[in-house]
Image (cartoon, helix red, strand yellow):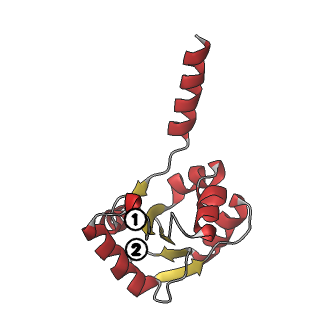
Amino acid sequence: MKKLAHILVFLLSFYGFSQDWKPTYAEALAVATDQDKPLIVVFSGSDWCSPCIKLNKKVLQSEEFISYSNDNYVLYRADFPKKKANKLPYELIADNVKLAEKYNPRGHFPMVVVLNNEENVVGRVSYKKQKPTEYISLINTFIK
């Protein structure tokens, strides 16, 4: 019975605080437009970029950010992993390269780009050693 309780607590915490990262940029843009929410594009090297890993672990996966982002943002991760085991499908790689050329031409990682419904950049920020609530406040300064 104790084991079942632990499993239940784990499942509730996992599903209660899961993020809704859209699988493609096109889907993310469609949802952002439909829901009139800002689109947050995170350029990341998830398996090689130390600041990217810190941003993900300390901010993006925090309860505060997950809770807030689920109600206020649409999220898309333009990931550029290097390890063979993490390789993305060719179409997704091509889409992420196009996005990087347009929104992150200097190739800074991590780079969080905030877009409005017209796909205009309203703000950019990299990893900063901040509490999740401070990072949310910073992102919100870009949104009118």
Q: Quadrant of residue 54?
A: bottom right
User: In the rendered image, which residue does mark 1 sit on?
Assistant: 32
Task: Work out which residue is located at the far left of the displayed protein and give it.
Answer: 91
- Residue type, mark 2 in image: Asn
Q: Is residue 135 left or right of residue 80?
A: right
Residue 42 position, x and y percent, is 50, 69
> What residue is shown at x 28% (from left), y 64% (from top)?
89
Residue 144 position, x and y percent, is 57, 75
User: In the rendered image, which residue does mark 2 sit on?
Assistant: 117
* Residue contact between numbered discs 2 and 1, judged by CB atoms under 8 Å: yes
Label 1 CA crowd tier, 10 Å (few <14, some 14–19, many 20+): many
Mark 1, secondary structure of its residue: helix
Residue 53 position, x and y percent, is 59, 63
Point out the tag, 2 or 1, that comes first from the N-terminus: 1
Mark 2, secondary structure of its residue: loop
Between 42 and 82, the one lying in front of the other is 82
Q: Quadrant of residue 83?
A: bottom left
Label 2 CA crowd tier, 10 Å (few <14, some 14–19, many 20+): some
Q: Is residue 16 above or below residue 45?
A: above
> What residue is shown at x 40% (from left), y 59% (from top)?
86
> What residue is shown at x 44% (from left), y 69% (from top)?
82
Q: Is residue 25 above or below residue 69?
A: below
Task: Work out which residue is located at the far top of the displayed protein and give it.
Answer: 1
What quarter of the picture does the N terminus occupy? Answer: top right
Disc 2 to disc 1, C-alpha distance: 7 Å
